Amino acid sequence: MSTKVVDRAPLTFYERTYLPAILGGLKITGKHLFNTLVKGKAVTMEYPEQKWVVPEGYRGAPYLVKDQDGATKCVSCQLCEFVCPPKAIKITPPGPTGESADRTNAEKMPKEFEINMLRCIFCGFCQEVCPEEAIFLQKDYSLTGLSRAEMIYDKEKLLKLGGTHAGIQKWKNKLEEAEAQEVFPVATK
Amino acid sequence: MSNAATTAPAPAPAAPPPVEKIKIKVDGREVEVPKLLPNWQGKLEPTTMLQAVQLAGGEVPHYCYHPKLPVAGNCRMCLVEFGTPMMGPDRKPVLNEDGTPKIAKSVLPYEPQTPRGAIACATPISPGMELYPNSPATKQMREAVLESLLINHPLDCPICDQAGECKLQEYSVEHGQASSRFVEAKVHKPKAVDLGPRIVLDDERCVLCTRCIRFTKDIAGDDALGIVNRGSYNTIAAWKAGAFDNNYTLNTVDLCPVGALTSKDFRFKMRVWFLKETKSVCTSCGTGCNITIGSRESTIHRYEPRDNDAVNGPWMCDSGRLNYKWVAREDRLKEVLVRGAKAGWGTALKEISAKLATAPQGSVAVVASARQTTEELYLLKKLAAKFDALTDSVARNGEADKLLVSADRNPNRTGARLTGVASAELGLNLPRIAAGIANGSIKTLIVFGEDVTKHGLGGDLLAQLDTLIVSDILPNATTAIATYLLPGCAPAEKRGTFVNVKGRLQKLMQAVEPKGDARAEWEFLLELVPHVTGQSGFKSIEGLFNQMAQEVPAFAGLEWAKIGDTGVTVQI
Amino acid sequence: MPEQFKLILKHADSPGYTPDLECYARHGGYEALKKALATTARDLADGKKLSPQEVVREDVKASGLRGRGGAGFSAGLKWSFVDRRSGKPIYLICNADESEPGTFKDRQILHKDPHQLIEGMIISCWANDVKLAYIYIRGEMPHGARLLEKALAEAKAKGFLGKNILGTGYDLEIYVHRGAGAYICGEETGLIESLEGKRAYPRIKPPYFPAVLGLYMCPTIVNNVETLCHVKHIVTMGPAEYAKLGTPNNTGTRIVSLSGDVMKPGYFEVEVGKVTLGQLINDPNFGGGLRPGRSLKAVIPGGSSSKVLKAGEVFKLNRKGADGQMTKVDVPLLDLPYDFDSLQGAGTMSGSGAIIVMDDSRSMVDVLANLSEFYAHESCGQCTPCREGALWLAKGTHRLAHGEGRKQDADYLSHIAQNIQGRTICAFGEAASWPVLSFVKKFKDEFEAQGAADEAARGKAARPNQH
């Protein structure tokens, strides 16, 4: 493959004085100076007194959500733990003796669910992989804490921060379907 | 098996009779396969299509077929389109124009344009047969069977323990359809049924392959399971609620191709894709079933049997399988104690070697354990030889069953005998040791892995000793009064070999790290023994084994690297 | 004018005929047995010699008798498959588990003339060196079972059964076994499993062909009630005389069960192939025609699992001309001779000889929903395609029959059925799928119209009940 060298157009004398560039820059600076001082239009946001309005689809911190009946949606399938690139998620499954799920007709929920927010990179894989719509990246972007331990959010905290997500109640629907199951042979009309 | 007898010339096996072979074609490729192959019981039977395809390097998906169970042929997943050489009315093969035999493809007798499959698991092959395990018709049949299996499946993979090792998942990816056209209501069946003390059943996930029924009836000899109801409402049930309680029930969990039968012990404990699999050997009795240890980080989550036709086939007993929890016990010995005070390994070993170096002949006795690895027993024997010390171990006997459990509950009695630590009958020397302590001739006792207070060497007798050196894993009456207490390792935490009751020498690999300061016994013995005996030793388990193989006649010619995953048989 | 030809039912329906031995003997009973036992060895032209038993077996083969249970397989050929060299005992089982919807012929024999069956069985057992035989009778026929028990006791008392039959030194025991009510027990290997005390799961073939690995893994013959009765008549008449009944390759008589929308439903014994389907439906000697004002819509010719035939259909059948050449001949539905080969030529089967007639008042969707429900209920559930497919078909047809259909349901149903036939362990897969395949194929417009109407009524909701 041959390389073709294209000559750069030589600068004109006027350009070589750099005056047009300097003036162009000063014009913008002047415009902002005027807008700020005279019109009172600030471009900087006075954080943390002022808070940024997060747009839709923003990928902030991942939290666990509850369904419309106030039940934990997570079933402890551990797919998020598996997919998490920085290994920020640690789930403790209920085990054979664990507490049964607080949700109708689902046998399993996590005993503990921890996200280390210091490791989390807000990539959203956990939300994408979740088969239960139980974890969502929400709008929090400013997470602070006084210790490393404090930055590991546990199940209780994640559920409290996550709020409610009203969606399909898969397990409840299964139960309703089972209860309404056709009995064979069906009685004909 | 890659490992024939390697020790003293074993009787040469009689030359096998010449294997009769037949030629068939698999996906157009000509292969020669034996006419007869062993069936599930090892009896020679006509080779099936499934075996032939496997020999040709292919695969036929299946649910109900299992090489070690009687053939049921009910899942229909292994339907394969095939053709046979056409026969003319004169009973001579019909030939194509090019002289090759003309093949008649299998078709429905009443619809000659539709291909007909045969179940590969039960249909014998015949000379000249052509199998099409990847033809469009075969694929369509598979797809249809898979669709049928899935229409009433609850699709609850997120909470199913089988997820990740489920044949429904695997075959759905390979042979399934992306979406379902099923618009009717699913059949709902009982969930979380208590089948027995160790088994829980989810009937909705069941594909009714009857592997569990066949296993428990024909292998375990306990006809506890059956099918109730009819048609799509068929459900597996125990003859009485909770009555599936023989000592082999957990094998049905391994056999179950889906998540219908799950282990109560493993239930909701860990997703299988997180488990590290380590090849090891069960140490609950002298059979030495091959196992795979499933662990994550420092926790053992399950034992599963590992195929070894020379020992356990694909099975293992429930008691052995569940005998791992003690490894994680809180009261494990985790600290080196010198006269009751915490000490470092260096200090303790230095003191012990100094003491032993000056010990007169006959003043030392060794009680080893037949639950230790052969290498450890070998090192202890070497140590004992220095003082011409009495050595022995402790017998541990129970009742044998018809399948796997052996009466000898020591996993390495054979090893103890071969290394010379004990005679054929364990415990014969224990009274002599007791007498030696009582008359003051024995001043130092080395005890490894046994609570000798329960075996005739009571606390008052032990109190007469100058030095009691004890290594163990869990605390007991002997460890409580040890002068030197050296915390040891569970078999899952170290490497080494065991020799089972039939003389099968097998390797253990390390699955998890030892707890606290505990160290593998062979490791610290390797530091101690050369100090005392003055001989130089190897620093690795491989070197140690190879050295032992040179000195112990039964292991002559063996090398660590030559012991395969399924072990070797030694002359006992 | 076609008429019945009563061979099996010659006496059974005559007034005053009772099912006891005394009455049977008065009508020439057990004479055939005596004749059979007196059979002499026969020398063949090629120098071989046939034993008396072999002579009877050859006679049955020569008579051209075909099984009356459903498949229409040659009875003599079936007997010839039996593994007689294994050294194991040979069993004979009489399949009296008559449960194909529309069939009620064996019941007539069992209830009216049990000794005829027993005589046929004894001859068949003797001819096949059977020492132990079973009658597997449907659980829903307690009366038949009681009659059989009584008849067996009578025969035993008279020395026709038990030790040293009629002084010949031949021993035979026959036991009656009552089923517990499952259609699948009529499948021969399912029946054998059930007889062994297990769940009636049909066996896989290969390797479990009853003739080699049948009852208790011994060679076993399973024959229908009517088939075994014919053996008696073959012995009485001689094979050549018997073969003159009926038509070539479709010899003898058979009992036809006629039901559905005809004036005179009932059972009729006819010479095979001598009467047409149309005569059976319309002739005053048989069905007596449809109800006034109704016209024929469809006929199921051989029990519910046979493929349906549509009124007005014309079939191309092979016919042997006077010159011996085979020619294709157009045969309208009503002119189909009622025999094994013609119905097979018409793409269906004569099965168990049960004709179900449907007139224009019947909705084919409802009929199919009814049939599919039966098969879903009776599928044993052993193998996947049938277990899941039969219920799927039932749910689909039920939905279509109850206002929740879709236009694509016709194709949906026949595609499901396609995935069942030929892929199952036993012929139940065909039995469950053939009605669907044939109904949907022949009445597709009706199924599609129903689906379209349902869709319109629902306002085009995409799927009826999404899961």
Image: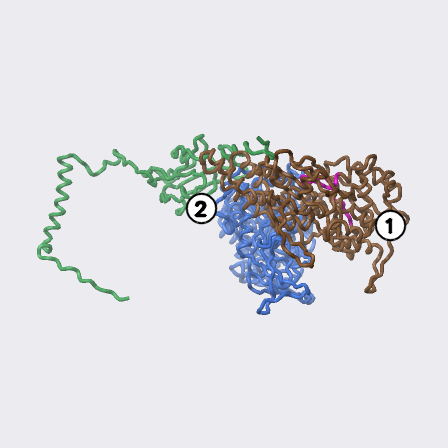
- C19 and B476: which one is in front? C19
Q: CA distance from mark 2 to mark 1?
A: 83 Å
Q: Colour of chain A?
A: green
The residue that disc 1 covers is C35
Position of C121 compared to C437: left or right? right
Q: Is residue B408 magenta?
A: no
In the depicted view, which residue is nearer to us: C175 or C276? C276
Residue B46: where, in percent of width, then height? 67, 59
Residue at 12%, 44% (x, y): give it: A27
Give the magenta part as a residue range: C91-107
Q: Colour of chain C?
A: brown
Please check whether the numbered discs 2 and 1 fall on a single chain: no
Residue B310 position, x and y percent, is 64, 57
Residue at the bottom extreme, as displayed? B99
- Residue B410 higher or lower than C268, as above or below: below
Please tell me whether mark 2 or mark 1 is closer to you in this view: 1
Q: How many marks?
A: 2
Q: Which residue is at the far right?
A: C167
Chain B is shown in which shade? blue
Pinpoint the chain carrying mark 2: A
